[in-house]
Image (spheres, coloured by chain):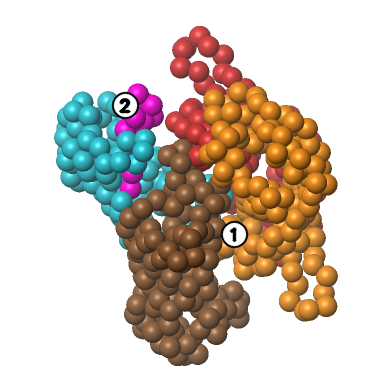
Chain colours: A orange, B cyan, C red, D brown
Amino acid sequence: MPASSTRVRVRYAETDQMGVVYHGHYFVWFEIGRVELLRQSGFDYKQMELADGCHIVVVEAACRYRSPARYDDELLVETRVAAVRQSALKSAYRILRLEPGADSAPKLLAEGETTHVVVDGQMTRALLPEKYLAALRG
Amino acid sequence: MPASSTRVRVRYAETDQMGVVYHGHYFVWFEIGRVELLRQSGFDYKQMELADGCHIVVVEAACRYRSPARYDDELLVETRVAAVRQSALKSAYRILRLEPGADSAPKLLAEGETTHVVVDGQMTRALLPEKYLAALRG
Amino acid sequence: MPASSTRVRVRYAETDQMGVVYHGHYFVWFEIGRVELLRQSGFDYKQMELADGCHIVVVEAACRYRSPARYDDELLVETRVAAVRQSALKSAYRILRLEPGADSAPKLLAEGETTHVVVDGQMTRALLPEKYLAALRG
Amino acid sequence: MPASSTRVRVRYAETDQMGVVYHGHYFVWFEIGRVELLRQSGFDYKQMELADGCHIVVVEAACRYRSPARYDDELLVETRVAAVRQSALKSAYRILRLEPGADSAPKLLAEGETTHVVVDGQMTRALLPEKYLAALRG
């Protein structure tokens, strides 16, 4: 199954008064990972919405937080396709912090999953066009 | 000119690691004030977008921050129409904190302005329908 | 076990280009519900952080989306304590849309849960002070 | 005066139901530009907060929107120091969209300014340490 890895840097706006990233923002990073996985699988989510009128909407999302992300941290968003059918898609994610020392392994901060269904512009259930399905099956 | 006042409570998600509200969120409160001013003037921004295909987009926004808003503060968003033409609209805002003591005046936290133009669904300049214009002129 | 219900109105800033609320924002509504449940149980999360140096951090969060929330919808956030121990707390949520007709039942849009642990200012595991524990046990 | 340029890609979460980026998010991009300008001038805003207890808070922010940013656009955030004193700092920004064709010039989407003062951890006015001042004067 396809997998991808992309980097994000924690923004000041993403922190809260505990001094760590607000937990809701991890789902935005998951979305960034998902879009990059699609891009690396050879298709463009923007074009899929525009050209095929096809949207992938979230029906379930979960995150388990191990250790907090902090302002200016450089993070790795690892994404993989966990399951794919013509009408639904499941992705799994890991958020890791890149440690400054060159020989330190990245530290796992959070793990999560999202489940998606395919809909058209009227939010009616639809099927993923075959070309995307093939790409996601890797 | 019409004016309105509405209340918001500061959300944890709106704070940053300085322990105060992140400055970008004030513009969201301005938008809440603007929508409530429209509602109190007798029209519904949601319907205006849906039924008339008319959108009010921001072309300029500014805020001056006097004193920080903090988590769980109860705020007053005061909004007034500062200028209105058929193709453009200017609003002015004040954000005040309601002080716990019954006899304390609310404390001014920030002031700002936004300027808007009217566009259709294709983002082309349009004119505000007459019924809305009349309401906004008060 | 204590339960509470509070209202939020969907902000324009919370929508995305699908024309519905971005899925990450539901976790902000869960947090609003949680804070209101605490308030209705007789304590103030802000004071708990300030006076007792006690923070409730999220270690797990999940949401299942049934039907999309849209701009300007009036929502009901129903929150209940699902489990409480001195070092951990689990809450459950339902997001419902208030339907315009007076005799329509609110429509269920989403359900979720969050699990929390108690930490001090240095993010070290701590115990919930007894007074809060009693309130949360109802 | 120091100037810097950094790239951001528009996130789905940043769009609204008009199909364009919500105007409040431009201030987050300005902040990203500011932090990168500081980094390129040789200092680290995170360390400045941690080691020197020095915070740069926004007292004024403004943005003029020329053309909307859209989902997945690659943007250039150009930042320059517009004025610097030991107690205050003014930055200016331009947001441009990188056009797909290699020979197209980036398109200007927005311009803005922010004014900042230096405060300590108690939000009391303070002076910028000399080492930072020198870096910002370029």
- The residue shown at (55%, 38%) is A51
Q: How many labels does the image show?
A: 2
- Residue D40 or residue C38, whichever sits in front: D40
The residue pinned by badge 2 equals B52
Amino acid at circle 1:
Thr
Q: Residue furthest top?
A: C103
Quadrant of the rendered image containing residue C5: top right
Query: Which quadrant holds residue A137?
Result: top right
The amino acid beneath tag 2 is: Asp
Question: Looking at this view, is B65 or A71 the one in front?
Answer: A71
Can you give x and y, in whole percent of width and height, for residue B80 in the image?
24, 42
- Residue B126: where, in percent of width, then height? 25, 37
Q: Determine the secondary structure under disc 2.
A: helix
Vertical side of C31 occupied by A41: above or below = below
Subunit of label 2: B
State which mark lies toward you, 2 or 1.
2
Position in image of residue A29 (x %, y %)? 65, 53
Q: Give the range drawn in magenta.
A: B45-58
Q: Left or right: where does residue A76 sit relative to residue B1?
A: right
Q: Distance between the residues labelled 2 and 1?
A: 39 Å
Instruction: Say if the magenta span includes residue B56.
Output: yes
Residue that mark 1 sits on:
A15
| Residue visible at 43% across and 76% down in the picture | D118
Asked whether residue B111 is drawn in magenta, I would say: no
